[in-house]
Amino acid sequence: MHSNETTCPSCEASITADNDVEFIEIDTEGTEMFSLGAPTKMYVIACGNCEVILGGGVGIAS
């Protein structure tokens, strides 16, 4: 039987609901951090308990 429960790899806090993670949007327009040729937004998902980054992505700003 497979469990749908996920735990943070850093602090082992249980991640079972949206409020167990923190969604952070970073606007990279006007910075020299990234050069993708268009205004870009980065999205980071972090543990709500220890704030370690669990995942993320990049999107072109409209």
Image (spheres, grey):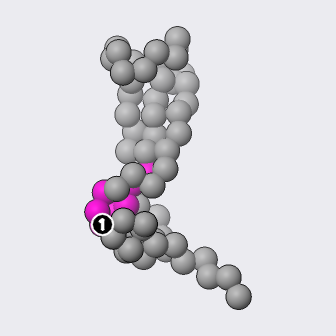
* Dot 1 amino acid type: Asn
Where does the magenta region start and end? 45-51
Say which quadrant the C terminus sits in. top right
Res 56 visible: yes
Residue at image position (68%, 82%) is 2
Which residue is at the front of the view, 60 or 5? 5
Q: Position of residue 32 (x, y in %)?
A: 35, 15
Residue with the most extreme top position:
37
Nearer-the-camera pick, 19 or 1: 1
**Does the image show residue 22?**
no
What is the crowding at mark 1: few (fewer than 14 residues within 10 Å), some, or many (at least 20)? some
Magenta stretch contains residue 20: no
Residue 48's image quarter? Answer: bottom left
Q: Is residue 59 above or below residue 48?
A: above
Instruction: Count the labels in the image.
Output: 1
Above/below status of 48 relative to 31: below
- Which residue in the protein does label 1 denote? 49
Q: Residue at image x 43%, y 66%?
A: 9
Q: Residue furthest front?
A: 10
In terms of image quadrants, where is residue 1? bottom right
Q: Is residue 5 above or below residue 24?
A: below
Q: Residue at (48%, 23%) from the top-left corner?
A: 40
